[in-house]
Amino acid sequence: MALVDKTALIGLESLVELVSLIMSFAVGYTAYRIYKITGEKRYLHFSLAFIFITLGFLVRAFINAGVYFGRKDVIEIAINTPVLTVHKALSLVYLMLMISAYLILIIITFRIQDAHLVSMMGLFAIVAVIASYYKFIIFPILSFLLLLYLVAHYYHGWSQKHTKYQLRTLWGFMIICLAQLLFPLVYLGSRYAFEGQEFFVAGTVIQCIGYGVLLWSLITVLRK
Amino acid sequence: MESDNSPAKVNEKRDKIEIVYDILSAVEKKGGKIKPTHLLYKANLSHQRMKKYLAELLEKGLLTEENDNANRWYTLTEKGAQFIAEYTRIRKFTESFGL
């Protein structure tokens, strides 16, 4: 049973993703500005991860726009055709951007410098993208697990110093991480004949709140 | 962050920007004006390295040098105070995002 009128949700997720896009860009841009001041690569890589996330949201907005602006029939044909269409190409780009972003964040925050390990993670990213491309349900589950590493890292950092800034960042990543658990329900919905659209919108909204908390953390840090 | 009276850390490798911050914040903690001997202790640098850093900070307008009878003082400028504020924000960002 649908919890809300499905037509009311059309476009809402794109709007929410646009907000997430702006917030992730703000974090990435700030990190880039810090890189320009300090010249330290870790800020550049951190910025790159958030710019990837921003681009990921942008690509997804294009995918959604294709659906919302009367191209639904074309998209459905494209999904069911074993040919690389624009939609499929965009989905691939989206997966690459998001998985790369999460892995970059893990590499920076865990200070992984071993070239072998980094290249192995790169290999993992390729496998993850291919697997997610053919079975999209893998992507949110994988995102949840990768984000769980970040949450564990931020929890460890917060448990050592207990600053309010660390706590906010921890909350932000925790919310984004938990939001990923709602997305697989959309795909399970189509398989087990229950409405899944609400879970998608709920996941997108919760994810947006997570990015909002990260932005809030950023604003309090930068406030004079 | 260090306490008000402790010298800068020596057991961890400090990069240039951090040394500049340590020097300027040492001046700020002394009310914006400090004697070279105090600064040397607070910043935890060799005399030679301190001279090099001070020359650069004076040239960039982050500190000014004043001579008061037999004493020499280093004073924090507005630009120096701005640098401290900016770097404090960077440190908070670094700590907040676990970088």
Image (tube, coloured by chain):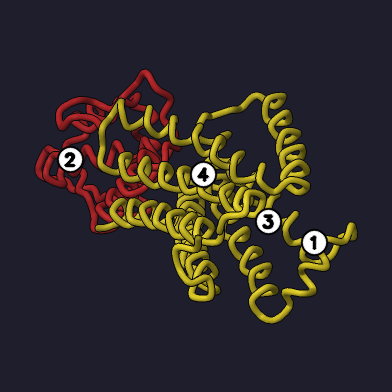
Chain colours: A yellow, B red
| Mark 3 nearby-residue class (10 Å; few <14, some 14–19, many ≥20) | many
Task: State whether residue A100 appears in this view.
Answer: no
Q: CA distance from mark 3 to mark 2?
A: 61 Å
State whether residue A141 is above or below residue A61: above
Q: Is A137 or A112 nearer to us in this picture?
A: A137
Same chain check for tags 1 and 4: yes
Indicate left or right for A84 with A151 as reference: right
Q: Is B16 or B48 nearer to us in this picture?
A: B16
Q: Nearer the viewer, mark 1 or mark 2?
A: 1
User: Regarding mark 2 in the picture, which secondary structure is present there?
Assistant: strand
The residue sitting at 63% across, 49% down in the picture is A192
Residue to which mark 1 is pinned = A79
The amino acid type of the residue labelled 2 equals: Arg
Q: CA distance from mark 1 to mark 2?
A: 76 Å
Q: CA distance from mark 2 to mark 4?
A: 64 Å
Q: Is A79 or A171 nearer to us in this picture?
A: A79
Residue lying farthest to the top in this orientation? B11
Tell me the subunit letter for badge 3. Answer: A
| Mark 2 nearby-residue class (10 Å; few <14, some 14–19, many ≥20) | some
State whether residue A91 is above or below residue A165: below
Q: Nearer the viewer, mark 2 or mark 4?
A: 4
The amino acid type of the residue labelled 1 equals: Ile
Residue to which mark 4 is pinned = A181
The residue sitting at 45% across, 63% down in the picture is A3
The amino acid type of the residue labelled 4 equals: Leu
Same chain check for tags 2 and 4: no
Residue to which mark 3 is pinned = A94
State whether residue A209 is above or below residue A72: above
Same chain check for tags 1 and 2: no
Q: Is A218 or A170 nearer to us in this picture?
A: A170
Tell me the subunit letter for badge 2. Answer: B
